[in-house]
C-alpha cells in the first residue's frame, strides 16, 4: 500500500521541508507585523488606530486563498514585483510568505492586543507619570507582560499557520499539499495511504509545537 514511498518518484520529505520553511518565515514576519498592528490599535494617534482597525477587520475577513492569489496575480504578474526572487518557483515562494504574513499578522495582532488588555492600567499610568513616552511604555512595560500572557493564543495561531501553508499550493509552491495533489492523481489505488502519510506529517509538525509552547506558556505565565 505504501510502495509509492519507496519508488523514489516523490520527495515527501522535501515537500514537508518547504512547508516548514513557509511556516518559519511566515511566523517571524507575522509576529513582527502583528506586533506593529497591535501597537497601532492601542496608539493615541487616531490615524494609526483607524488604519490598524481597518486593516485587521478587512484582511482577517478576507479568504486566505484570495490573498495568496492576489499576491501572485497582482504583484507579480501585473506589477512585476518579484521581492528579489529568481525564477517563478522562488518568486511564488516569497509571495506566498507575504500573503501568509499579511493574513496571519491580523490574528497575531488581536492575540497581542488581548494580552495588552491584561496589563493593569496603573502600570502604564505610573510609567507616563515618570515621563516615559507612549513608545517606551509600550515596549518596556506593556509588551513584555502582554507576550507572556498570550503564548497560548499565539501557539494556536502558529498551528493554524502551519496548516494554512497548504494554500500556497494554489500558486504552485512545491509544498506538501501540492505534492499530495500530484500523488492523488498518480496513485489512484492508494488514496487512503496518501491521505494517511500527509495527515501524519502535519500531526508530527503541529503536535510537538503545541506541547512545547503549551509548556512554555505555563512557565512564563504572569502570576496575578
Image (cartoon, rainbow, N blue to C red):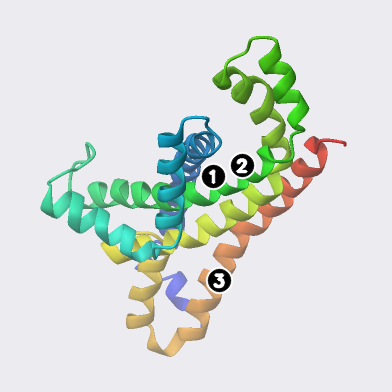
Residue pointed to by mark 1: 109
Quadrant in which the C terminus is drawn: top right
**Label 3 CA crowd tier, 10 Å (few <14, some 14–19, many 20+):** few
Of circles 3 and 1, which is in front? Answer: 1
Label 3 residue SS: helix
Residues at discs 3 and 1 in contact (Cβ within 8 Å): no
Q: Quadrant of residue 176?
A: bottom left
- For image coordinates 55% across by 64% down, the residue present is 201
**Location of residue 5 with respect to 221 vertically, above or below:** below
- Give the Cα distance between marks 1 and 2: 5 Å
Residue pointed to by mark 3: 199
Q: Looking at this view, is 188 or 5 the one in front? A: 188
**Label 1 CA crowd tier, 10 Å (few <14, some 14–19, many 20+):** many
Of circles 2 and 3, which is in front? Answer: 2
Question: In the drawing, what numbered circle is on residue 112?
Answer: 2
Q: Give residue 139's position: percent from left, percent from top.
A: 60, 23
- For image coordinates 59% across by 17% down, the residue present is 136
Amino acid at each position: 500500500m505504501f510502495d509509492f514511498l519507496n519508488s523514489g518518484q516523490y520527495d515527501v520529505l522535501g515537500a514537508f521541508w518547504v512547508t516548514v520553511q513557509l511556516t518559519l518565515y511566515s511566523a517571524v514576519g507575522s509576529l513582527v507585523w502583528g506586533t506593529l498592528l497591535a501597537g497601532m490599535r492601542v496608539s493615541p494617534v487616531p490615524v494609526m488606530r483607524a488604519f490598524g482597525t481597518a486593516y485587521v477587520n478587512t484582511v482577517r475577513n478576507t479568504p486566505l486563498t484570495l490573498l495568496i492569489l492576489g499576491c501572485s496575480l497582482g504583484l507579480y504578474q501585473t506589477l512585476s514585483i518579484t521581492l528579489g526572487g529568481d525564477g517563478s518557483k522562488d518568486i511564488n515562494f516569497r509571495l506566498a510568505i507575504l500573503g501568509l504574513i499579511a493574513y496571519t499578522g491580523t490574528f497575531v495582532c488581536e492575540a497581542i492586543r488581548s494580552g495588552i488588555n491584561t496589563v493593569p492600567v496603573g502600570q502604564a499610568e505610573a510609567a507616563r507619570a515618570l515621563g516615559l513616552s507612549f513608545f517606551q511604555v509600550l515596549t518596556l512595560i506593556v509588551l513584555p507582560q502582554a507576550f507572556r500572557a498570550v503564548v497560548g493564543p499565539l501557539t494556536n495561531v502558529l498551528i493554524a499557520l502551519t496548516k494554512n501553508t497548504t494554500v500556497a499550493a494554489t500558486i504552485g509552491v512545491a509544498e506538501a499539499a501540492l505534492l499530495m495533489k500530484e500523488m492523488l492523481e498518480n496513485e489512484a489505488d492508494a488514496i487512503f495511504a496518501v491521505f494517511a502519510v500527509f495527515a501524519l506529517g502535519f500531526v508530527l509538525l503541529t503536535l510537538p509545537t503545541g506541547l512545547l509552547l503549551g509548556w512554555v506558556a505555563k512557565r512564563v505565565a504572569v502570576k496575578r
